Image: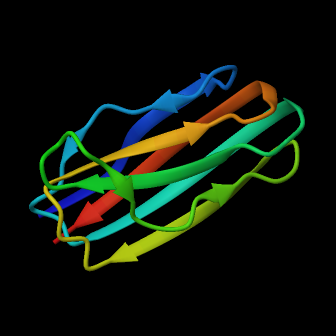
Amino acid sequence: MYEANKVIIPATVWDANITSTVFAAAQYSKIGMQIIWASLTGTIDGSVVLQVSNDGTNFDNAHTPVVVSGVGGNDAVALDNIFFGYYRVVATKNNVTGGTVSVIVTAKE
């Protein structure tokens, strides 16, 4: 099974914390996540993390959160051996006051 370029968080104004929809992940063991941010304002210290769960309710971080740096940019996270039933992405704005953030995921068995 392979799912390419799934937009988890479309380009969204980052003026509040964002939690994506919960996605089923039992069929995937590898996930690649790309985070893209642009035109950020305020103190640029937001973070983005992929979270995993087996019950779909209680989530924990699958990696160290990516801290955005600079007004615009991107970063990528590759995760292997992801054996959980569900995942979601959380973008925490901290002191970011504007601009956009988006997250795209590719997952495979």
Q: Quadrant of residue 107?
A: bottom left
**Of the pair 106 and 28, the residue shown nearer to us:** 28
Q: Quadrant of the C terminus?
A: bottom left
Residue 81 lies, in percent from the top left, at: 25, 79
Above or below, 14 relative to 38:
above
Residue under the image location 87 percent in, 42 percent down: 71
Which picture quadrant has residue 94? top right
- Looking at the image, which residue is at 56% across and 39% down? 91
Q: Report the number of discs.
A: 0
- Left/right placement of residue 62 relative to residue 27 reads right
Give whichever of 75, 47 is nearer the camera: 47
**Which residue is pictured at 61% across the width and 38% down the height?**
92
Q: In percent of the image, x 40 and y 39: which residue is there? A: 7
102 relative position to 84: left or right = right
Q: Residue furthest bottom?
A: 81
Residue 64 location, x and y as percent? 55, 67
Depth check, front residue: 73 or 61: 61
Q: Position of residue 42 (x, y in %)?
A: 90, 30
Q: Is residue 23 above or below residue 53?
A: above
| Coloration of the structure image | rainbow
**Above or below for 78 versus 40:** below
Q: Is residue 74 above or below residue 18?
A: below
Outermost residue toward the front?
58
Location of residue 1 by image quarter: bottom left
Q: Position of residue 89 (x, y in %)?
A: 42, 44
